Image (tube, coloured by chain):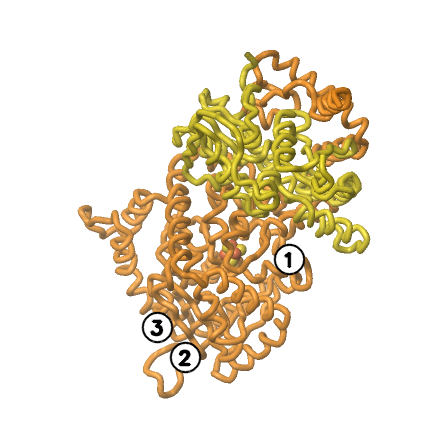
Amino acid sequence: MSQDQPRVGLFVTCLIDMLRPSVAFASVKLLEDAGCRVEVPRSQTCCGQPAYNSGDRKDTEALARQTIEAFEGYDYVVAPSGSCGAMIKDHYPTLFAGDPEWRARAEALAGRTFELISFLVDQRGMTSVEAKLAAKVTYHDSCSGLRELGVKAQPRRLLASVEGLELTEMNEPEVCCGFGGTFCVKYPDISNEIVGKKAGDIEASGAELLLAGDLGCLMNMAGKLKRSGSKVEARHVAEVLAGMTDTPAIGEERK
Amino acid sequence: MESQSHDFKNRSSGAIKDEQLQRALGNVRKGFIKKRADVAAKLPEFEALRDAARDIKNHTLEHLDLYLERYEAKVTESGGKVHWCASAADARAAISSICAAAGAKTVTKGKSMISEEIALNDHLEKDGLTVVETDLGEYIIQLRKEPPSHIIAPAVHLSRDQVEADFRRVHRELPEDRNLTEPESLVAEARSILRQKYLDANVGITGANFLIAETGSSIIVTNEGNGDLTQSLPKVHIVIASLEKVVPTLEDATAILRVLARSATGQEFTSYTTFSTGPKRAEDLDGPEEYHVILLDNGRSKMLGTEFQEMLRCIRCGACMNHCPVYHSVGGHSYGWVYPGPMGAVLTPSLIGVEESGHLPNASTFCGRCESVCPMRIPLPKMMRHWREREFEKHLSPATVRQGLSFWRFFATRPALYQFATGMAARVLRAMAGSKGRLSRLPLAGGWTKYRDFPAPEGKTFQQLWAEEQKKRRKAA
Ligand code: SF4
């Protein structure tokens, strides 16, 4: 390995770590293909979003400090999730507005933190991937990645280079899927109403595979699609871009 | 208006089951969003205008006392009178006494959310006055004795058939074969009744989109022209406005007007933009003899200098609710107070207290679409989060949520223990799912599995697998 390879700390995200490690492995592969050295700090757990969005400042700060400490030594921090990426990049600095030392540390980290796909395209200049998948797919723009980090064109650009893949846009790909972290369990009826509309749009697109960049949204949409008997499968976009689609799709039976 | 916000959950569940309402909300989702997008795309400087509009309001709010005093001086100079009202009760009392002094029996009203906020109609009716709403949407909901469900389209929750039925119920002399299926025919029908009311009214009450400090003028924008008649025919014109409506100059107001109509209805400009400055002068042919401004605070000055100050930039365009997935699902009435949607989720707790409205700032997925379309660039999710923080500090959030979070933090701040626990959980859930790949029922997660399957974990956590892989890689090297 040459010295000019940047050291990337992979922020695995708590959902991916526990529920779908294949996304993290796909991320490692994509980052290595983009010339990075990848490390996974063991002292990371969760970015603190559930506490933050529940108004629990103290616990959020505790988790933010832990995350900052875990990732301080790296050239970049990359998360295969727009919402965790935005938490570190956009929200950590404002958390410590009244604490100059931690604020400086948070800002320094924020400046080096990226969502996976935008990192590959915007920072590493990746324009294509070596992957094959003969499938008609549709892509959901998860809210935080889209609106807080500007992730929109990058995944589509890389998907266009996947051999055999056909992208078909659903109606309103930018509309929230109704996951919203704790929202989906606090307001199940409303969340279901929103994801129900989303599932309808996904079905209507004619795609056989749904892709997105956030596991939370994917679990929500896949869970709804499966409950309503849909044949549409769901995967994190990184799995497709890394050519790692031999594991069953999210929520699918094991062969 | 009495708050029903604590009942948000029940109301929203009912709204979701209401098929007629859901059809009506489909119109919000389709119509408003597309129109705004089209008209914004046609104006290259739209984003720059939003910045300018935000800056104007920020400047004004920084010097609010100054501009309000200047405004009052100008109104007085033009022969009008400003009534400073700290509370809804003060405003109602001031309006009552103006109406009494004018010997009023009938009052016509243009659309005004403030008058909803202070429950003015009920109050004036108790005084023995007849109150007639002149905006078509307001007129319809007045017939139905309902509150508005949207700040610019008060009757958006209704279908044409419902409105037609209401008209036929109340307008007794309406011929059976009269066609009422088009909005124009409804406007014409309402107008035929309203014409006489305008002439009967001794007092006309309007809201205001802007108050101009430079000239002492107030501005209303409408699409039906009803505001013009409301304020020019009766002897007395009362403007009710909250104090953050003031802007320094006419030019400032017109700059903000350019983003207002585009954001609200997707029009480049509304059909009528009406300025009024003081009562009729000696040489004027028409206009009111008296001109009063009810300048309402009702909790707004308490927002100044706090993290909620930015909310006072709101120009009530409704774009945030038009783009909100939660509003689309539950409609305006679910929110239980005057102001629905994302703007209501911030404003309602500011005005009536978070104790009365705790659900509202929580009932958001934080998708951020409201902020992305707000012409005044109000960071709505951020401010909802501030409310959640206040609620959490005051121990108003549910005990289950608080316990869940402290349990989560206990593990999440102890990485080794955390990894052990998540490793166990992943294994157990995997075993529960068997080869099925998903769980249709999960203890403690009924909110999820009521409607969705829960995708099962793959088996081991990434941290476990990564440690194994590192070992392999080291051996190979
Ligand atoms: S918050 Fe913004 S989008 Fe919503 S009504 Fe006010 S100005 Fe319009």
The picture quadrant where one finds residue B350 is bottom right
Q: Residue B233, which numbered label?
A: 3
CB atoms of marks 3 and 2 within 8 Å: no
- At 46% across and 61% down in the image, what residue appears? B46
- At 38% across and 66% down in the image, what residue appears? B227
- For residue B120, say whether it is visible: no
Chain A drawing hue: yellow
**Label 2: chain letter:** B
User: What amino acid type should be assigned to the residue bearing mark 2?
Assistant: Glu
Q: Which residue is mark 1?
A: B308
User: What amino acid type should be assigned to the residue bearing mark 1?
Assistant: Phe
Q: Residue B289, which numbered label?
A: 2
**Label 1: chain letter:** B
User: What amino acid type should be assigned to the residue bearing mark 3?
Assistant: Leu
Give residue A96's position: percent from left, percent from top.
76, 51
Indicate left or right for B430 with B251 as reference. Answer: right
Q: Nearer the viewer, residue B24 or A144?
A: A144
Give residue B139's position: percent from left, percent from top.
37, 55
- For residue B88, say whether it is visible: yes
Which secondary structure, mark 2?
loop
Q: CA distance from mark 1 to mark 3?
A: 39 Å
Residue that extends furthest to the bottom in the rendered view of this protein: B283
Chain shaded orange = B
| A112 up-or-down from B241: above or below | above
Q: Nearer the viewer, residue B314 or B368?
A: B368
